């Protein structure tokens, strides 16, 4: 091992256990074993298409990963631009490498670290973004697997474990096989600041990449091992190829190429493992893949995905719907991702070495997006892992002084508004999530509410954020008001009644920005006067915008914690329903863009399903007695905004699982319109049956009678055989399991959910 090595973790012994069964015990075990096999006999992973969302503005990637894995090994086109935020877009026709870190569905591009590119000969050391053509007809992907044959005849196959990727390269006979490690490869904002690569022995290399981009500081260590001996090892820097080790030059960027002798048609295998701690730790992570059995690693990866799909089993004769649903469920397991080594150690963006007290550390928290539906879904589908995710947020606060806003590689990007770790933690505390310390979580939530950045002090001083003090003032005010409502609920649960009163009052900030003359929530300056001119269709971006990735039409409805209070501002529930109708049906679907973001997409009137602020709006009808209109709108959104094709799979950025979580919830028949309320509002179920395997160990079966595409309306509901009249179901009731039956029809039953006692809170 070269000098200046970092900390070498201790070796842990592996214990082999043998379990002996008596004949009687074996017979008792057999039904459980057969039941387990039956659970996996559906082969639900066959309905997942990793290419859905890779085209258009979806920004997903098609490569190989396991649920929430640290490694996401996937092709990169070598193209810069917004629609290449994941490194890949289905509309492209070149590949520049296969890197090991990817962001799923984000609106900013970063990562794509540790890029490997094969070639039939040494690549010119002056060549940047060396690319090869390919055709989609020679490309395939399934959960935990990706394969492509390049036009130069090289076939690449990829699979992965949590921290290690396995590559399989098949070169044309007679080729001079080369693997290029392009540590300088970067997309969009990202750039390499320092990288090194070492030859450890005739089949192992190690290195690291330090970069800056969306996250100003990113560090990743890697180790790679080949199945064949390396014939020649080249290091290149500033256009100079060297066949010897490089001098240590601070701030220099080094890449490497590995040459192999003619493989005579035999495949070349490559393992690449990652660590945030050290090169030595990355070498240890290579042990996640014991040998070169590609088929076994691929099968194991698919098995991990099958376990995730098995948690929500749907029945329908519509295979298109199955592909939409299971691909969406697949995308809900793409973020956050593991950041710590198997022993719980990690090195954060500050360079400090830490170890989780229990469990693993995660990163990639797109909280402005995911607090709405993905994180509430985790309380059902990820009960164990969710505790680690929540404790990762608390660890971030310990290390940085505040809860994360948008954590990338443990660096605070401060992307988007609000302090949206709060609703996630509040929901978890209110649902009594085991392994989460409620008092610690509350103390950290309160820190965010009194931070001295991001306009918070001005918000406290004026009761709203004035536009002349901070841009996006309406979006920030509404986000803070909702976050404060969440803090109030936790304060009440913990008996902190003074705080409950304080934050409840702060949560009413939206009323100070409601303008009855225009019927919109709009910006005010610090003198209390409205910002002029005002155009509710204006969706411009930048400092002067009152909104964030949206306009007055979308943001006026962001009061999920006090829907009837908002309705009262309009004068009556009927007036509020009329306003909702106007959003969907009677307004133009054209926004007035200046320098507005492309995120505002998937338009139905001024409802923008391609961006998260609209996601709860269709469910708001149910809060004022018009559940049938929720049912109608939700079914229309499901049918028009989700497809099983790459280009139009999603109406906008998939955003780390949020766009998919909306589909998962809504296709089952309900949705957390107020994400921290513990209530799931009924919509319009599309499946004949859904079997939900719950954290309680019980099962909830959701059945739909008279189900048809032209039957979007709920006629009646029963819960465990008894009539059920509420327009929602609580988390507590759901966890008890049983059978929830929807009877659907072609015409609305306007009486269902119409009584006030049946409205969600």
Image (spheres, helix red, strand yellow):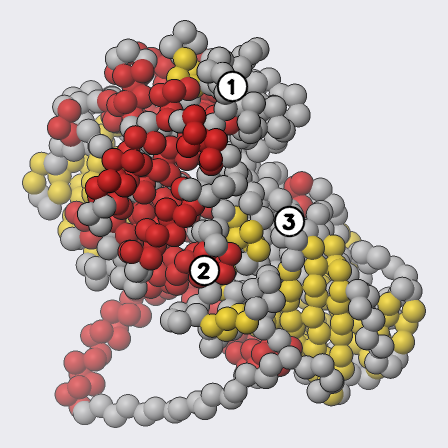
Residue 26 occupies which quadrant of the picture? bottom left
Query: Which residue was labeled with disc 2?
Result: 398
Tell me the quarter of the picture where residue 205 sits.
bottom right
- Of circles 2 and 3, which is in front? 2
- Secondary structure of the residue carrying tag 2 is helix
Q: Element under label 3?
A: loop
Which percent across, then down, holds residue 741?
18, 41
Q: CA distance from mark 2 to mark 1?
A: 35 Å
Going by the picture, which residue comes out furthest to the right? 240
Query: Which residue is disc 1 drawn over?
Result: 525
Which mark, by number, is residue 466?
A: none
* Residue at point 83%, 71% (across, down): 249
Residue 597 image point, x, y percent: 61, 30
Say which mark, if any, is on residue 214: 3
Q: Residue at x 92, y 69 (%)?
A: 240
Along the line of sight, the residue nearer the viewer: 413 or 385: 413
Task: Using the numbered discs, state the Cα–Cα distance from disc 1 to disc 3 in whole angstroms.
Answer: 31 Å
Q: Earlier in the sequence, mark 1 or mark 3?
A: 3
Q: Secondary structure at mark 1?
A: loop
**Identity of the residue drawn at 21% across and 80% down:** 29
Q: CA distance from mark 2 to mark 3?
A: 22 Å
- Residue 659 appears in the picture as rendered: no
Q: Residue at x 51, y 34 (%)?
A: 455
Q: Is residue 202 above or below residue 336?
A: below
């Amino acid at each position: 091992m070269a000098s200046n090595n970092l900390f070498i973790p201790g070796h842990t012994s592996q214990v082999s256990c043998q379990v002996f069964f008596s004949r009687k015990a074996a017979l008792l075990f057999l039904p459980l074993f057969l039941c387990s096999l039956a659970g996996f006999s559906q082969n639900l992973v066959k309905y997942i298409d990793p290419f859905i969302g890779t085209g258009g503005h979806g920004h997903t990637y098609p490569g190989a990963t396991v649920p929430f894995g640290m490694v996401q090994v996937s092709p990169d086109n070598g193209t810069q631009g917004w629609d290449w935020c994941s490194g890949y877009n289905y509309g492209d026709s070149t590949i520049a490498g296969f890197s090991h870190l990817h962001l799923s569905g984000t609106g900013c591009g970063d990562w794509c670290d540790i890029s490997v590119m094969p070639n039939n000969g040494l690549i010119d050391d002056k060549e940047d973004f060396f690319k090869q053509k390919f055709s989609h007809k020679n490309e395939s992907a399934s959960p935990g697997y990706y394969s492509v044959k390049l036009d130069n005849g090289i076939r690449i196959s990829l699979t992965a474990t949590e921290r290690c990727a396995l590559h399989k390269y098949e070169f044309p006979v007679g080729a001079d096989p080369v693997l290029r490690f392009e540590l300088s490869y970067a997309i969009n904002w990202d750039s390499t600041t320092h990288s090194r690569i070492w030859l450890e022995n005739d089949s192992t290399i190690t290195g690291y990449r330090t970069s800056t981009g969306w996250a100003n500081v990113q560090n990743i260590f890697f180790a790679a091992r080949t199945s064949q001996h390396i014939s020649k090892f080249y290091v290149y820097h500033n256009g100079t190829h060297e066949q010897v080790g490089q001098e240590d030059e601070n701030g220099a960027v080094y890449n490497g190429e590995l040459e192999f002798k003619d493989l005579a048609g035999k495949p070349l295998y490559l393992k690449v493992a990652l660590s945030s701690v050290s090169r030595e730790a990355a070498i240890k992570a290579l042990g996640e893949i014991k040998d070169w059995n590609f088929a076994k690693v691929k099968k194991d990866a698919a098995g991990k995905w099958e376990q995730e799909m098995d948690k929500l089993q749907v029945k329908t004769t519509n295979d298109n719907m199955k592909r939409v649903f299971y691909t969406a469920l697949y995308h809900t397991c793409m973020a956050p991702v593991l950041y710590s080594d198997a022993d719980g150690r990690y090195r954060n963006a500050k360079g400090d070495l830490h170890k989780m007290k229990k469990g693993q550390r995660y990163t990639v928290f797109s909280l402005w997006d995911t607090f709405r539906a993905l994180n509430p879904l985790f309380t059902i589908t990820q009960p164990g892992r969710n505790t680690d995710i929540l404790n990762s947020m608390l660890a971030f606060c310990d290390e940085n002084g505040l809860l994360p806003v948008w954590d990338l590689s443990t660096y605070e990007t401060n992307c988007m508004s609000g302090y949206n770790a709060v609703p996630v933690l509040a929901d978890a505390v209110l649902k009594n999530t085991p392994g989460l310390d409620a008092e610690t979580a509350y103390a950290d939530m309160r820190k965010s509410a009194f931070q001295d950045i991001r306009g918070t002090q001005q918000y406290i001083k004026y009761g709203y954020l004035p536009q002349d003090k901070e841009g996006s003032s309406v979006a920030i005010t509404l986000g803070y008001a909702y976050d404060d409502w969440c803090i109030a609920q936790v304060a009440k649960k913990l008996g902190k009644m003074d705080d409950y009163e304080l934050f409840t009052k702060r949560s009413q900030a939206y009323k100070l920005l409601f303008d009855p003359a225009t019927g919109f929530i709009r910006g005010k300056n610090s003198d209390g006067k409205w910002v002029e001119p005002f155009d509710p269709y204006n969706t411009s971006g930048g400092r002067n915008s009152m909104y964030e990735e949206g306009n007055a039409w979308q943001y006026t409805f962001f009061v999920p914690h006090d829907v009837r209070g908002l309705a009262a501002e309009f004068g009556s529930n009927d007036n509020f329903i009329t306003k909702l109708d106007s959003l969907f049906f009677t307004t133009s679907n054209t926004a007035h863009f200046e320098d507005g973001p492309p995120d505002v997409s998937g338009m139905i009137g001024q409802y923008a399903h391609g961006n998260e602020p609209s996601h709860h709006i269709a469910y708001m009808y149910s809060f004022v007695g018009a559940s049938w209109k929720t049912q109608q709108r939700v079914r229309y959104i499901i049918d028009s905004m989700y497809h099983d094709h790459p280009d139009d799979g999603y109406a906008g950025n998939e955003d780390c699982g949020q766009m998919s979580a909306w589909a998962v919830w809504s296709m089952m028949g309900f949705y957390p319109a107020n994400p921290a309320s513990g209530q799931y509002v009924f919509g319009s179920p599309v499946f004949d049956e859904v079997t939900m395997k719950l954290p309680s160990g019980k099962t909830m079966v959701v059945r739909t009678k008279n189900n048809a595409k032209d039957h979007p309306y709920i006629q009646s509901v029963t819960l465990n055989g008894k009539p059920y009249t509420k327009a929602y179901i609580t988390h507590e009731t759901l966890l008890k399991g049983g059978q929830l039956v929807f009877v659907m029809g072609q015409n609305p039953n306007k009486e269902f959910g119409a009584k006030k006692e049946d409205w969600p809170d």
